[in-house]
Image (tube, helix red, strand yellow):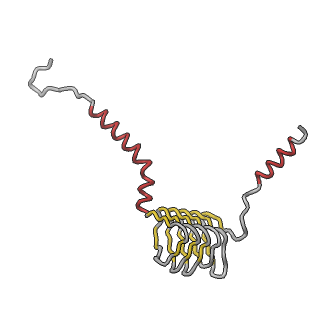
Amino acid sequence: MPLRRPTLILALLLAAIPATMHARDRVGAFTTFKIAAGNDANDVVCAFCTITIEGPIHGDLVTAFSDVTVADNTEIGKDTVTAFTDLHFGENVTIGKDLVAFGSFGDLPASTVVHGDRVVVPAWLAFLFALIPFAIPAGIIYLIVRLVRGRQTYAYVPPPGYPRV
């Protein structure tokens, strides 16, 4: 019982410590990153950013809704994952592991070397996937309305001159 309060305080302090980030990681949103030719980075994670890469990345590159330009002869050490990103890879870009480009625009030259899996989903197909959750309920609502309107009966109104009953 006497250790309950210090243990609780220690647990709260440990929970308050943010996840460790290396000094060379670039993490942000709504910003611009430039990794110059003489510099390098460990991991680059960004949403709604503009990223220019001229130096090596030793870790992962993860972007969403961004604009990424990778210079010629640049190396990305691990995975590259992009979602709805405008990609511009230079010649002889090397990716250490996997490349996943979901709904991304831009060019991936044939000289891009990927040492793992390469999964590229074109933008039009990704937008189609994004519309499926809306299309299914819309189709169900359309069918219900069609069935209800098809069962409606309308009162017959005789034309003028006919006796009404």
Front position in the image: 142 or 44: 44
Give the residue displayed 47% in from the left and 62% down from the top.
103
Classify 54 as above or below 30. Answer: below
Residue for point 59% across, 76% down: 75
| Quarter occupied by residue 79 | bottom right
Residue 27 or residue 116, whichever sits in front: 116
How many numbered discs, if any?
A: 0
Q: Quadrant of the C terminus?
A: top left
Residue 69 position in % (x across, y down): 54, 74
Q: Position of residue 16 (x, y in %)?
A: 76, 53
Q: Position of residue 128 (x, y in %)?
A: 41, 56
Residue 95 lies left or right of residue 15; in this view the side is left
The image quadrant of residue 22 is bottom right
**Where is the N terminus found, in terms of image quarters?**
top right
Residue at the farthest right position? 2
Residue lying farthest left? 161
Q: Is residue 140 left or right of residue 164?
A: right
Q: Which one is in front, 119 or 6?
A: 119
